[in-house]
Image (cartoon, rainbow, N blue to C red):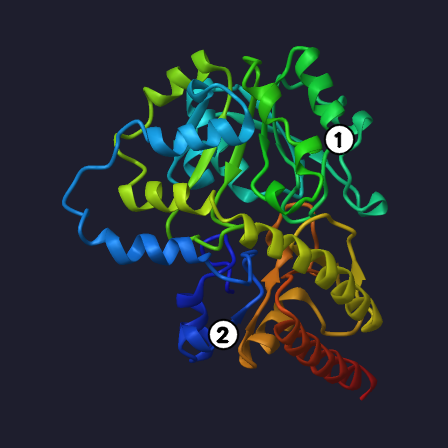
Amino acid sequence: MLERYGHGGDLRTAEETFGFPARQFIDFSSNMNPYGPPDGVRRVLVHYAEQIDRYPDPAVRGLRSKLARLHRVDEQSIMIGNGAAELIDLVVRALKPPVTALAYPCFTEYGDAVMKSGGKIEPIMLSSDNSFELTESMAEQSKAKFYMIGSPNNPTGQLVDPALIMKLVYNGATVVVDEAFMDFIPEEEKLTLIREAANHERLFVIRSMTKFYAIPGIRLGYMVGAPQQIAAMRRLQVPWSVNSLAQQIGEAVLEEKDYALRTMNWLQEEKPWLIQKLEGLGLRVIPGNVNYLLVQLPGVPGLTAATLQYEMGRMGLLIRDASHFIGLDESYCRFAVKLRHQNEWLLEALGRCLSKFREAGRA
């Protein structure tokens, strides 16, 4: 099982399982920008050795200032973290909700954070019948006063209506919105709740900088909330949790406007093409909004997400077995959208695997 530690992108486990060096795998199991880090990252790395003997800025002022200008919010409403994962854990530890509503399937670290804090989970089970969309009637079934919501959601890729989220807040709930993949949405400016979060004590937005800019090894994310709430959480944060290299890279990538435009143009062209090809192979594709696709395998004897993952891994391609997400069964996989030649390799390998299982079923 490649998801031994709960995530995709575990190349060490892939090496141990399939016997190839990490560089030989094409990794569709983690949802990174396939263009790799922008040039600004390399420029930072070239000069970083001269500064490694200095402490990082404990307040991360440079990056916070740039993000404040980008989102047009008060700098005091922004908190930088060691990846979005640190901030998910921190917001739950700080607010200590006795009961948290989670809409399944969702990112597993939401539930992990709740359980570690001693809280309870009230599940909202999304349905494949409406492509796992969180509707108002579903959300309002919960009696919880604390929600953690992914928008776009992982692994479904579905957006949640901002008006629905704000209605929960106005009705007295505290809502944490994980917008880790919002950068990939062309209508980001209309859909993000960052500015609302900066002015409301019961709304928090968490963003990742690692997916869009392909820097997962650095660990960098940020949270936006009302200044007094952010100040209280900052007092609970481990000192210097964001190292100086991450801070400098964060500032550099925000200047990469051409890279961002190139990424958006690629995704708008490549994703519809890949969806069409996957459907042509007999897979059901959930109509998400981001740079990954949740797919349901056809009903072929012996074909499951786990068996397909193993067969694909033997060919050097890694996919995500999505059955490990609560609310999904063994027929669901998740694929990242990559560059055309990589997606063609994925499709060729999928076709070979599906033919193999279909022929075995007829034998």
Q: Is residue 211 above or below residue 120?
A: below
Secondary structure found at label 2: loop
| Category of crowding for the residue at label 2, using alpha-carbon neighbours closer than 10 angstroms: few (below 14), some (14–19), many (at least 20) | some
Q: Position of residue 160 (x, y in %)?
A: 72, 34
Q: Is residue 186 left or right of residue 85?
A: right
- Residue visible at 63% across and 26% down in the picture: 193
Q: Residue 41 is drawn in which quadrant? A: bottom left
Q: Position of residue 70 (x, y in %)?
A: 52, 32
Q: Is residue 297 above or below residue 218?
A: below
Residue 340 visible in the current orientation: yes
Q: Position of residue 141 (x, y in %)?
A: 76, 23
Q: Amino acid at mark 2?
A: Phe
Looking at the picture, tell me which residue is in the foreground, 229 or 260. Answer: 260
Q: Residue 248 is drawn in which quadrant? A: top left
Residue behind mark 2: 25
Mark 1 vs mark 2: which is more N-terminal? 2
| Category of crowding for the residue at label 1, using alpha-carbon neighbours closer than 10 angstroms: few (below 14), some (14–19), many (at least 20) | some
The C terminus: image quadrant: bottom right
Q: Position of residue 351 (x, y in %)?
A: 74, 80
Q: Separation of disc 1 and disc 2 at Cα?
A: 37 Å
Residue behind mark 1: 161
Do the numbered discs 1 and 2 sit on residues whose CB atoms are within 8 Å?
A: no
Looking at the picture, tell me which residue is in the foreground, 44 or 86. Answer: 44
Q: Is residue 155 above or below residue 1?
A: above
Q: Is residue 98 left or right of residue 65?
A: right
Q: Amino acid at mark 1?
A: Asp
Residue 175 visible in the current orientation: no
Q: Residue 138 is drawn in which quadrant? A: top right
Which numbered tag is attached to residue 45? none
Q: Is residue 97 left or right of residue 163?
A: left
- Residue visible at 65% across and 56% down in the picture: 292
